[in-house]
Image: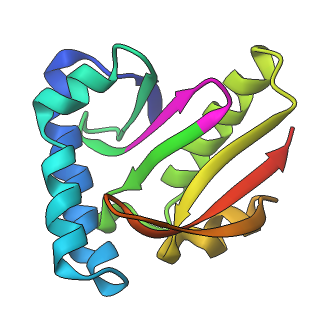
Amino acid sequence: MIIRQLKIIDAPAVSEVIITCLKEENSKFYPPEIIERMVKLYTPELIIRSAIDRLVLVAEDINGSIVGTATFNLGFFGSVFVHPNNAHQGVGSKLMNTLESLAKNQGQKKVKLHSSINAVGFYMGRGYMKGRFVKDVKFGKSYRMTKNL
Protein backbone atom coordinates (compact mmCIF):
# COMPACT_ATOMS: atom_id res chain seq x y z
CA MET A 1 0.00 0.00 0.00
CA ILE A 2 1.28 3.42 -1.00
CA ILE A 3 0.02 6.69 0.47
CA ARG A 4 0.76 9.57 -1.86
CA GLN A 5 -0.49 12.93 -3.02
CA LEU A 6 -3.40 13.10 -5.45
CA LYS A 7 -2.59 13.38 -9.14
CA ILE A 8 -5.18 14.91 -11.46
CA ILE A 9 -5.60 11.55 -13.19
CA ASP A 10 -6.71 10.05 -9.81
CA ALA A 11 -9.76 12.29 -9.44
CA PRO A 12 -12.33 9.96 -11.08
CA ALA A 13 -11.19 7.00 -8.95
CA VAL A 14 -11.20 9.11 -5.78
CA SER A 15 -14.69 10.33 -6.62
CA GLU A 16 -15.83 6.73 -7.11
CA VAL A 17 -14.37 5.65 -3.75
CA ILE A 18 -16.08 8.50 -1.92
CA ILE A 19 -19.44 8.09 -3.64
CA THR A 20 -19.39 4.33 -3.01
CA CYS A 21 -18.70 4.96 0.69
CA LEU A 22 -21.49 7.50 0.90
CA LYS A 23 -24.03 5.25 -0.80
CA GLU A 24 -23.05 1.95 0.85
CA GLU A 25 -21.92 2.98 4.34
CA ASN A 26 -22.98 6.51 5.23
CA SER A 27 -26.48 5.94 3.87
CA LYS A 28 -27.08 3.62 6.85
CA PHE A 29 -26.75 6.65 9.16
CA TYR A 30 -27.87 9.61 7.05
CA PRO A 31 -31.08 10.44 5.16
CA PRO A 32 -31.11 10.22 1.35
CA GLU A 33 -31.18 14.01 0.86
CA ILE A 34 -27.89 14.39 2.80
CA ILE A 35 -26.27 11.57 0.81
CA GLU A 36 -27.45 13.10 -2.49
CA ARG A 37 -26.10 16.51 -1.47
CA MET A 38 -22.75 15.05 -0.48
CA VAL A 39 -22.44 13.00 -3.69
CA LYS A 40 -22.64 16.28 -5.62
CA LEU A 41 -19.72 17.66 -3.60
CA TYR A 42 -17.34 14.88 -4.63
CA THR A 43 -17.23 15.03 -8.41
CA PRO A 44 -13.81 14.61 -10.03
CA GLU A 45 -13.80 18.32 -10.91
CA LEU A 46 -14.52 19.41 -7.35
CA ILE A 47 -11.89 17.01 -5.99
CA ILE A 48 -9.27 18.58 -8.27
CA ARG A 49 -10.41 22.05 -7.19
CA SER A 50 -10.19 21.10 -3.50
CA ALA A 51 -6.56 20.06 -4.01
CA ILE A 52 -5.67 23.70 -4.69
CA ASP A 53 -5.99 24.75 -1.04
CA ARG A 54 -5.52 21.47 0.82
CA LEU A 55 -3.43 18.35 0.61
CA VAL A 56 -5.36 15.43 -0.84
CA LEU A 57 -3.87 12.01 -0.21
CA VAL A 58 -4.73 8.73 -1.85
CA ALA A 59 -4.14 5.15 -0.75
CA GLU A 60 -3.09 3.00 -3.67
CA ASP A 61 -3.08 -0.79 -3.38
CA ILE A 62 -0.46 -3.11 -4.88
CA ASN A 63 -2.50 -3.30 -8.11
CA GLY A 64 -2.43 0.47 -8.54
CA SER A 65 -6.10 0.93 -7.58
CA ILE A 66 -7.17 3.86 -5.43
CA VAL A 67 -8.80 2.39 -2.31
CA GLY A 68 -8.89 5.38 0.03
CA THR A 69 -8.43 9.12 0.36
CA ALA A 70 -7.98 11.82 2.99
CA THR A 71 -7.45 15.57 3.13
CA PHE A 72 -5.42 17.88 5.35
CA ASN A 73 -5.46 21.64 5.73
CA LEU A 74 -3.97 23.65 8.60
CA GLY A 75 -4.41 21.14 11.40
CA PHE A 76 -7.80 19.97 10.17
CA PHE A 77 -8.34 16.52 8.68
CA GLY A 78 -11.28 15.97 6.40
CA SER A 79 -12.79 13.64 3.87
CA VAL A 80 -11.26 10.37 5.07
CA PHE A 81 -12.83 7.59 3.04
CA VAL A 82 -11.90 3.93 2.47
CA HIS A 83 -13.68 1.86 -0.16
CA PRO A 84 -16.01 -0.62 1.59
CA ASN A 85 -14.26 -3.54 -0.13
CA ASN A 86 -11.04 -2.48 1.63
CA ALA A 87 -12.47 -1.71 5.06
CA HIS A 88 -10.75 -3.25 8.10
CA GLN A 89 -7.51 -3.80 6.17
CA GLY A 90 -5.52 -0.92 7.68
CA VAL A 91 -6.08 1.56 4.86
CA GLY A 92 -7.73 4.15 7.12
CA SER A 93 -5.02 3.73 9.73
CA LYS A 94 -2.27 4.23 7.15
CA LEU A 95 -3.98 7.37 5.86
CA MET A 96 -4.37 8.71 9.41
CA ASN A 97 -0.75 7.85 10.32
CA THR A 98 0.40 9.84 7.30
CA LEU A 99 -1.85 12.80 8.13
CA GLU A 100 -0.72 12.85 11.76
CA SER A 101 2.92 12.64 10.74
CA LEU A 102 2.51 15.54 8.30
CA ALA A 103 0.77 17.62 10.96
CA LYS A 104 3.58 16.93 13.46
CA ASN A 105 6.19 17.89 10.85
CA GLN A 106 4.36 21.19 10.37
CA GLY A 107 4.55 21.86 14.09
CA GLN A 108 0.91 21.13 14.86
CA LYS A 109 0.32 20.18 18.49
CA LYS A 110 -3.36 19.33 18.04
CA VAL A 111 -5.47 18.19 15.10
CA LYS A 112 -9.19 18.41 14.53
CA LEU A 113 -11.73 16.66 12.37
CA HIS A 114 -15.45 16.22 11.97
CA SER A 115 -16.41 12.56 12.16
CA SER A 116 -19.45 11.06 10.52
CA ILE A 117 -21.59 9.10 12.93
CA ASN A 118 -20.36 5.80 11.51
CA ALA A 119 -16.65 6.64 11.97
CA VAL A 120 -16.59 7.85 15.61
CA GLY A 121 -15.39 4.48 16.93
CA PHE A 122 -12.51 4.38 14.44
CA TYR A 123 -11.24 7.79 15.55
CA MET A 124 -11.74 7.11 19.25
CA GLY A 125 -9.66 3.96 18.80
CA ARG A 126 -6.87 6.20 17.47
CA GLY A 127 -6.96 8.43 20.54
CA TYR A 128 -9.29 11.16 19.34
CA MET A 129 -11.59 12.77 21.87
CA LYS A 130 -15.24 13.08 20.93
CA GLY A 131 -16.42 16.64 21.27
CA ARG A 132 -19.50 18.58 20.41
CA PHE A 133 -22.26 17.17 18.23
CA VAL A 134 -22.64 19.28 15.08
CA LYS A 135 -25.59 19.47 12.72
CA ASP A 136 -24.68 20.87 9.30
CA VAL A 137 -27.01 21.48 6.38
CA LYS A 138 -24.54 20.10 3.80
CA PHE A 139 -23.03 17.21 5.72
CA GLY A 140 -25.67 16.23 8.26
CA LYS A 141 -24.78 15.21 11.80
CA SER A 142 -21.19 14.77 12.88
CA TYR A 143 -18.95 15.05 15.92
CA ARG A 144 -16.06 17.41 16.36
CA MET A 145 -13.05 15.39 17.41
CA THR A 146 -9.55 16.37 18.48
CA LYS A 147 -6.25 14.71 19.22
CA ASN A 148 -3.08 16.04 20.81
CA LEU A 149 -0.05 15.00 18.82
Name the magenta segment's main secondary structure.
strand
Residue 106 within the magenta-colored segment of the rendering:
no
Q: Residue at x 67, y 39 (%)?
A: 97
Q: Position of residue 33 (x, y in %)?
A: 17, 74
Residue 106 position in % (x across, y down): 75, 14
Nearer to us in this view, 9 or 36:
36
Where is the N terminus found, in terms of image quarters?
top left
Where is residue 67 shown, x and y percent of the image? 32, 48
Quadrant assignment for the C terminus: top right
Residue at 69 percent of width and 45 percent of height: 112
Image height check: is 11 above or below 120? above
Q: How is the image coloured?
A: rainbow
Q: Within the magenta stretch, is there residue 71?
A: yes
- In terms of image quadrants, where is residue 29? bottom left
Residue 127 in percent (x, y) is at: 82, 59
How many marks overall? 0
**Horizontal side of residue 20 vs 102, given as left or right:** left
Q: Residue at x 75, y 66 (%)?
A: 131
As drawn, 69 above or below 83: above
Residue 33 is left or right of residue 88, and the answer is left
Magenta residues? 69-76
1 lies above or below 31: above
- Residue found 31% across the figure and 67% down from its top: 84
Residue 73 versus residue 127 in the image, above or below: above
Asked whether 51 or 57 is in front, the reply is 51
